[in-house]
Amino acid sequence: MKKHYVLPQPAYAHYVCYPEMLGHYTDFPQHAERRSEGFLGSYNLHMVFGGEGYVFQEGERISMKRGSGFLFPRGAYQQYGSDPGQAWNVRWVHFATALSLPMLEEADHSRGYFFTFDPGTGYEPVFEEMYRLSATYETRSEPRLSTLLYEILVTLMQNSEPLHGSVPLEIRHSIRLTADRIHSECERPWTLEAMARLAGYSSYHFLRLFRSIMGKTPNRYLSDCRMARAKLLLVSTELSVAQIALQCGFHQSSYFIKVFRQLEGLPPNQYRRLFSS
């Protein structure tokens, strides 16, 4: 199968990112590209969901299997293709962007970013919607195409690692599952030890991994989750401040009010008056 779409320049010139060309190749062992320096004026993202392929970088042949991919910056020399004996299942997109993302910056700096990702993180339905909109292109689809591409890039930022990264994807996945559990049960009396035990790591190791992957400490993440729930309950219910405190993991309303004021700059009742309708 060979899906290949080329989009016209968007009518609106200020999208933060926009696909120029995209496709999906399976059972296409002839797929191979070799582009000279300066030939392609857009970013080129390939993600492998099955089979095998390869990419060359500085004379080194890098194997590409399920869960691996590459991102070339604008104007970079490119050489890659499918394994003739086991054709890859690859989804790809050429795109323009004004975004400043670490992944894009790394590609610009090194002239090629090679990574691993979790194929089960939901990329394929997003690509499929992009293909559908591209096949029946209308100008009114442009905002959605830009949004879908942005979703792929940001999801990839959160769920990928450099090909020789220090944090394997299965560890990243387990930390995010733990974070989701903490978020959904933020009223529980979580301790660092309890959170680490849930993830299956020592407290020290969990703290280091969580900060690296989530960008904040577990306790700060827990506090942010509790504040988000508290603000929602304040503006959407008539529960008392004491009841909301209990539902957000605070057993003393006075402490809840103190923490809320420290983080939000005003007490809960004032927040409710300002933001509830």
Image (spheres, helix red, strand yellow):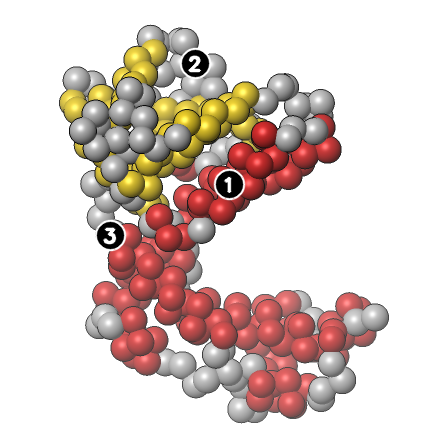
Identify which residue is drawn at 49% across, 78% down.
186
Amino acid under disc 2: Leu
For disc 2, the neighbor class at 10 Å (few under 14, some 14 to 19, many from 20) is some
Answer yes or no: do the residues labelled 1 and 3 have beta carbons within 8 Å?
no
- Say which residue label 2 marks: 40
In the rendering, at what x and y percent does residue 29 appear? 27, 25
Secondary structure beneath dot 3 equals: loop
Pick whichever of labels 1 and 3 is earlier in the sequence: 1
Answer yes or no: do the residues labelled 2 and 3 have beta carbons within 8 Å?
no
In the rendering, at what x and y percent does residue 183 appear? 48, 71
Pick whichever of labels 2 and 1 is earlier in the sequence: 2
Identify which residue is drawn at 58% across, 85% down.
247
The vertical placement of 165 against 99, above or below, is below
In the rendering, at what x and y percent does residue 258 appear? 60, 80
Answer yes or no: do the residues labelled 2 and 1 have beta carbons within 8 Å?
no
- Say which residue label 3 marks: 168
Amino acid under disc 1: Glu
Q: Determine the image quadrant of residue 254.
A: bottom right
Identify which residue is drawn at 54% across, 28% down.
19
- Say which residue label 1 marks: 128
Q: Is residue 25 left or right of residue 99?
A: left
The vertical placement of 143 against 176, above or below, is above
> Residue 274, can we see it?
yes
For disc 1, the neighbor class at 10 Å (few under 14, some 14 to 19, many from 20) is some
Please tell me how many numbered marks the rendered image carries. 3
Q: Determine the image quadrant of residue 174.
A: bottom left
Of 208 and 153, which appears nearest the observer? 153
Front tag of 2 and 3: 2
Pick whichever of labels 2 and 3 is earlier in the sequence: 2
Alpha-carbon distance for marks 2 and 1?
24 Å
